[in-house]
Image (cartoon, rainbow, N blue to C red):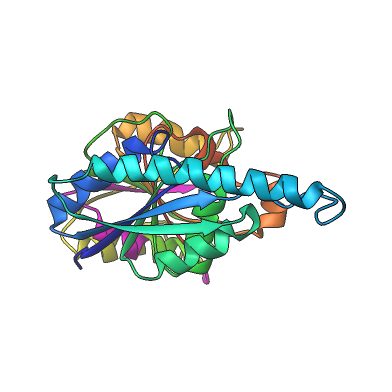
């Protein structure tokens, strides 16, 4: 399975430049078409819009945002002139509450979408971009950690295996980015044999299946010993020297995740290596 179409989602030419540069390198490596979803996120309408002078104030703020982002994206595009690979610019203007839907729409026309991870230190839309692609497009999303400046992924990977539909989807999609001779650690956490889940041996069946695709497979059944599943996976990623974590995203409802953060949300905020998520 080959990548032929990649989209990188950007909310800002400055903040998302590392993700863009990685996407360029990745597209060149895979001889793939690269599109850039350049978002202009408009300020939300405030209470009182249309009453008295509030409408004029809002219209002024709206136009100022458009002018500022147009100047930023124009400068960004000027810097692309004559460089490889050629980049298809897709300018997407939307309100904050429509970022998910717009991201999902854009992602349906790519094999893989690349997005910077959410950052807890500032208010930005990357969490909505990730969730939009993941939940609404049927496409995998590669999430790059804030500040990550690596150039290589997929030669050593940890796969979070919980015998779910989402995990199976992610494992299959990982073949888009894994190198042909990749070393892959399939990891379970506190797993027990079961007829309808892991089978007789946790990780054995999926390890045998994936090895038939030519990868060097190791199965590790980890005990949490009081740690969260996310922390177990992060510890394993360090010990395995992996540069990619593969997992099924948001197996539990997002409302539940918002109340008690699950594995996906925890890894989005804390992982130091890229995540490949599928749903």
Q: Which residue occupies 40% across, 40% down? A: 72
Tell me if I can see residue 153 in this picture: no
**Residue 277 screen position, x and y as percent:** 43, 55
**Residue 87 screen position, x and y as percent:** 23, 54
Query: 253 and 164: which one is in front?
Result: 253
Figure check: 168 above or below 38: below
**Residue 59 screen position, x and y as percent:** 68, 50
Figure check: 150 above or below 104: above
**Residue 267 screen position, x and y as percent:** 51, 40
- On whether residue 225 falls in the magenta region, the answer is no
Identify the image quadrant of residue 89: bottom left
Figure check: 120 above or below 25: above
Tell me if I can see residue 62 in this picture: yes
Query: 255 and 182: which one is in front?
Result: 255
Q: Which residue occupies 25% across, 43% down? A: 78
Figure check: 148 above or below 94: above
Q: Which residue occupies 20% across, 68% down? A: 1
Query: 64 and 201: which one is in front?
Result: 64
Identify the image quadrant of residue 138: bottom left
- Range of magenta residues: 171-196
Looking at the image, residue 32 sits to the left or right of residue 117; the answer is left
Looking at the image, residue 202 sits to the left or right of residue 120; the answer is left
Q: Which residue occupies 19% across, 64% down? A: 213
Count of numbered labels shown in the rendering: 0
């Amino acid at each position: 399975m080959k990548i032929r179409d990649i989209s990188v989602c950007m909310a800002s030419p400055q903040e998302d430049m590392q993700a863009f540069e990685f996407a360029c390198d990745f597209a060149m490596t895979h001889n793939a078409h690269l599109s850039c979803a350049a978002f202009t996120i408009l300020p939300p309408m405030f209470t009182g819009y249309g009453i008295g002078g509030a409408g004029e104030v809002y219209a002024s703020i709206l136009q100022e945002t458009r002018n500022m982002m147009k100047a930023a994206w124009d400068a960004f595009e000027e810097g692309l002139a004559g460089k490889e690979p050629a980049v298809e610019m897709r300018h997407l203007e939307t309100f904050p509450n429509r970022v998910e839907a717009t991201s999902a729409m854009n992602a349906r026309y790519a094999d893989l979408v690349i997005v910077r991870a959410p950052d807890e230190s500032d208010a930005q839309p990357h969490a909505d971009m990730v969730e939009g692609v993941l939940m609404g497009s049927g496409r995998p999303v590669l999430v790059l950690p804030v500040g990550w400046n690596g150039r290589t992924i997929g030669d050593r990977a940890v796969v979070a295996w919980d015998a779910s539909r989402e995990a199976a989807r992610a494992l299959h999609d990982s073949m888009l980015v894994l190198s042909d001779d990749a070393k892959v650690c399939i990891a379970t956490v506190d797993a027990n044999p079961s007829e309808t889940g892991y089978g007789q041996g946790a990780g054995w069946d999926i390890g045998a299946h994936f090895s038939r695709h030519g990868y060097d497979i190791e199965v590790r059944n980890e005990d949490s010993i009081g740690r969260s599943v996310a922390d177990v996976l992060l510890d394993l990623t360090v010990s395995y020297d992996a540069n990619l974590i593969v997992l099924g995203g948001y197996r539990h409802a997002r409302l539940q995740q918002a109340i008690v953060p699950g594995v996906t949300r925890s890894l989005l905020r804390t992982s130091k290596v890229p995540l490949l998520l599928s749903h």
